[in-house]
Image: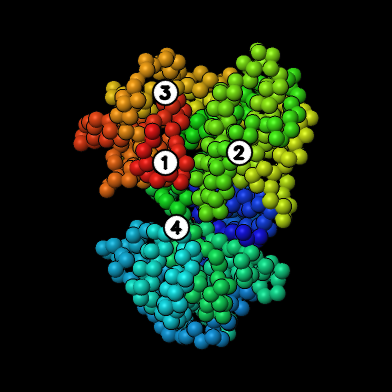
Amino acid sequence: MPSRFYITTPIYYVNDVPHLGHAYTTVAADALRRYHLLRGHESRMLTGTDEHGLKIERSAAEAGKTPQAFVDEMSARFRQAWPHLSAEPDDFIRTTEPRHIALVQELWRRVEANGDLYLGSYEDWYCVGCESFKTEKELLPGNVCPLHQKPVEKVREETYFFRLAKFEQRLLALYRDRPGFIQPESRRNEVISFVEGGLKDLSVSRTSFRWGVPVPGNPSHVMYVWFDALANYWTALGGPGDPLQRFWPAKGEDARAVHLVGKDILRFHAVYWPAFLLAAGFTEDELPSQVFAHGFLTVDGQKMSKSLRNAVDPLRIAQELGPDVLRFQLLRAIAFGQDGDFDHKALFTNYRADLANNLGNLLQRTLGLTTKLTGGKPPSVAADRLDRELLDGELRAHEAAATERWDSLEPHRAIESTWAIAALANQYVDHAAPWAAAKRGDQARVDVILATLLEVLGRLSVMVSPVIPNKAAEMRAQLGLPPLSTTVGRDAWPHGDVASYRGESLGAATPIFPTFDKDAEHAMLDKLTPKPDPSTSTATSTATATSTSTSTSTPTPTPTPTPTPTSTSTSTSTATSTATSTPSSVTYDQFSAIDLRVGLVVRCERVPKKDKLLRLEVDLGEAAPRLIVAGLAQTFAPEALVGRRVVVVANLAPRDFGKGLVSHGMILATGPSDALHLATIGDDVAPGSRLK
Ligand code: MSP
């Protein structure tokens, strides 16, 4: 296990203000930083701003400012934004800072001394938006950049070339020998194909503008912004001899350096950056441990763009709902590594289901029961007398899965495992029924149940803290636990200070995730949802939720409500009456006629114009995934289901939903349609396994 962890975000261009895409990487990096601190690792997070280049020079001119005044102002907006999202980088680097400039020049000198830079001239198409040259193959008709939808410019100038082609084989060997270097796997394959396609030497200096780092010994050239920018990961650690070098390039097993990037800039990080480092004399084992590319976010199903005016201001959401709610949604709803949608309605759905009804409710009902059944004094019960069946059984497996998932950079799945613990504990309350034990006069049992629940909540207050640090702190205060603290070398995960839990007294219990009534939710949705430009709007008019839902009843089975003694939610579940009626008995043969199988959701999307339905492709261990249509859309964002294991009735007669959409199975779930819980199974069970 590494004892040092260095995590970086890209440094953001200052021609834009912080938007949801920037917030996504920054929040993910911060959650990982927090997780590693809990593990007792020495942990360091770096972010910053990328301030040179033609694009910035032009933006400054458009704003009527000098480049320096412009970048000072814009960089400050990024620096000031992150604390509002509870993201706490250890360092914030700006490429215009002297500490960066001096070291990036040092890096250049090293590459030049090794003979990997030479002077030549270059003529090609250049996209200022991308700050990169484009081949004709990459352009749309009319020489338009496909990313920026703007014509590129023909640029001819004297330039230094970097001998990128020379590194082709070494890079391919690196990808082969260190499969973890580029993740996720699909992206790794893309990079390998790109390099296998042949690398050309790269132009790395410009003479036609001045806003850049001067090339040492030839100041009529400024460095290519990507040479300048990528170097930040190294320059921020102070250069040779600086103690911060213990984070990277520290050789050996005990240090892990991870670059988080968006998929659009993976090539720069996975091809150019290691090549620059190798050229500067770094060895393969001194390269960063991993470049992880996350996907792109859309907003309410649409590409985020300034021209559509649908760019989401993360600060606004954090201000209205608190940073934790935004962090949770970003990390839970979007599978890290895949593209995903930031759906405002799903934000409220997940808020209700996971935060208010699951975690929040567990805390409230436990505190409420403790007040009622033990006079508010947490029972003191020896660890070995707690309900070990709960603590050492499935719950422990979820803890182990969460750990593994944080380690493998899968925050969405770590969250899933963590919240499964809360769900399990909620079920435990129902089954253990401390109120019934109290009625019987069995105070010893009441104490065991409540102490067990307080123990689980104590652990959860640690485990949720990378994602929702402020709510975790509130939880701990209500539980009477000391604030979380971390110490290098002491692994506080996932049990933290629970061992030192004295159980003296509980803090004041107030709902940590207050529920919104429908009107308040609509008003908030209206406030937060970006208003698209009417001239460019297409499908957005469907977002008003007034459309009457279709008459097709959802194919989820009858929901069974979970009793929630302290729940404030009054959502009317349509099917509660059947839940308590005793079904007439069936023979074993009748039961075994139902083919229940473990399914793995491999793809999931909304069904257009049906606000309750999702279209899933589920791997049942058959030749091809099954298509299943399920009424899960009011609880789950489609991305949240991808990668989850579900229980499927595999031999249900096909059901036709019209327009060629035929469902071939049913997914088991319980709860009201806007707060469903899926019947699930451990991750180690193979898709297609039969339940009997
Ligand atoms: N300055 C370069 C990075 C240099 S790193 C040595 C840059 N800056 S950026 O501001 O344009 O983008 C920064 C990051 O934001 C990229 O990782 C990019 O993928 C990410 N995002 C921008 N829009 C995004 C979404 N819509 N969704 C997710 N991330 C996106 O590139």
Callout 1–callout 4 Cβ contact below 8 Å: no
Mark 2 to mark 1: distance in Å?
22 Å
Which residue in the protein does label 4 denote?
184
- Mark 3 surroundings: few (<14), some (14-19) or many (≥20) residues within 10 A: many
Q: Secondary structure at mark 1?
A: strand
Viewer-side residue, 413 vs 329: 413
Question: Three-letter amino acid code at disc 3?
Answer: Pro
Q: Is residue 39 above or below residue 520?
A: below
Residue 352 in the image: state x and y as whole percent: 51, 29
Residue 112 in the image: state x and y as whole percent: 54, 84
Viewer-side residue, 54 vs 79: 79
- Mark 2 surroundings: few (<14), some (14-19) or many (≥20) residues within 10 A: few
**Is residue 524 shown to the viewer in this render?**
no
Viewer-side residue, 410 vs 611: 410
Residue furthest to the front: 588
Which residue in the protein does label 1 denote?
645
Which residue in the protein does label 2 denote?
392
Q: Earlier in the sequence, mark 3 or mark 2?
A: 2
- For image coordinates 42% across by 14% down, the residue present is 581
Question: Three-letter amino acid code at disc 1?
Answer: Arg
Q: Earlier in the sequence, mark 3 or mark 4?
A: 4
